[in-house]
Image (cartoon, rainbow, N blue to C red):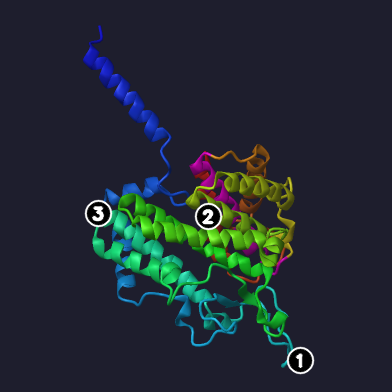
Amino acid sequence: MMTKKNVFICICTFMLVCVESHAKPVVYLWDYASLVAVQQQPKSTAYRDMVRQADWVLRHEVLTVTQKEHALSGDKHNYESLATYYWPNPANPSGPYVPRDGEQNPDTEKYDFPRLLALARDCAALGKAFFLTGNDVYYDRLCRQLDAWFIDEATRMNPHFAFSQFVPGLNDNRGTPGGVLDAYRLMDVLESIQLTDNTRSLGRKRMRALKRWFSDLATWMVESENGRQAALFGNNHAIAYHGTLLGIYLFTGKGRGQRTAIKDFGQLVVEQINEDGRMPNELKRNNALTYSVFNLSHILDVCIMAHTAGLKVPEEVSRRIDASCRYLSTFIGHRERFPYKEIGNWEAEERNLKRELQRKERLR
């Protein structure tokens, strides 16, 4: 026979389970369970590697978009990057650059893209190290980095990618719709913000400023001409576009935007992946395997974020993903069977594909 005390305990336990089951996720894209497992093993290689990477960050300067010597746009607060696969035209050296698909122009290193990659890398390292160790040195540095890139008036980035992946000689060096893809690199920044704020508050004022910055970016993506065109691309660009919006809307708590992003994403997956698993618009590239895996990675990112957030992805999307994974996996260890062009590092892409096949298991 249950006593009143036992009944009270059962009710409290039930309520606690209900609250936990409906609690807001700590992160949406990173594997939180894996991070907790590493946290509990401070002598493990994974733990030491994460902390070592953050210690490396501490030895280097805080990154800002204004660190470039010159701004083609006239404003150092504008993010600027060179179109990755565009080169000078041998037939017209002083004219507009021309495309060479799959061949990266090394001059991309002269603009802001490397800083954007480093920003994502550093924020991820600092956020994870603080989560693992609770050491304020990582927390303080992450706050400084976030303030410098997104908040401080002297160094903050303007919340748009209007000058991203510009083609020299065209459109007054303004950005292209494909440049919106660069914004996807901010997903690790969002994850680091959410992981850290859940561990120790980043402060209401800072969080309001960060959410305002990302809300402004989402507005630019939806309303700008480059953003609208990027949403209509028939390849990985459009997938990344809607993935970026979903990540931002999850961070800012805009439910309607989340549902719209998932709906548009679902339509894109069905359009881009044939029933046999092939992605025609990626397979016609000079890096056919590279871009097939790249697109699969973005697709899984969106599905993982949706799954974590409790958002439903259409069944047909799951079927197309399964088909794509089956199709691509047939070429692991069998490059000779691949009937398309791949000028990149085949072995590296095989490793990337294996990693994506493992990540897919998170959706079960």
Relative to residue 122, is residue 223 drawn left or right? Answer: right
SS label for mark 3: loop
User: Which residue in the protein does label 1 denote?
Assistant: 92
Label whose residue precedes the other's in the sequence (2 or 3): 3
State the image coordinates of residue 32 (x, y, percent, origin top left). 39, 48
Q: Residue at x 54, y 81 (%)?
A: 75
Q: Taking 4 as reference, is 344 above or below it?
A: below
Q: Nearer the viewer, mark 1 or mark 2?
A: 2
What residue is shown with label 3?
A: 42
Q: Position of residue 133 (x, y in %)?
A: 25, 56
- Viewer-proximal residue among 129 and 311: 311
> Left of 348 or right of it: where is 233?
right
User: Looking at the picture, how far across and down is residue 242, in whole percent?
Assistant: 62, 54
Observer-side mark, 3 or 1, equals 1
Q: Is residue 239 magenta?
A: no
Q: CA distance from mark 2 to mark 3?
A: 32 Å
Residue at 72 percent across and 47 percent down: it is 276
* Position of the N terminus by quadrant: top left
Q: Name the magenta segment's main secondary structure.
A: helix
Q: Quadrant of residue 19?
A: top left
Out of 340 and 3, give the one closest to the viewer. 3
Q: Is residue 363 left or right of residue 241?
A: left
The mark closer to the camera, 2 or 3, is 2
The stretch of residues the image draws in magenta is 285-310
Residue 291 drawn in magenta? yes
Q: Which residue is mark 2?
A: 248
Whether residue 335 is visible:
no
Find residue 237 and report its horizontal and vertical position in percent: 65, 61
Q: Is label 2 in contact with label 3 (beta carbons under 8 Å)? A: no
- Name the residue type under label 1: Asn
Q: Nearer the viewer, residue 137 or 50?
A: 137
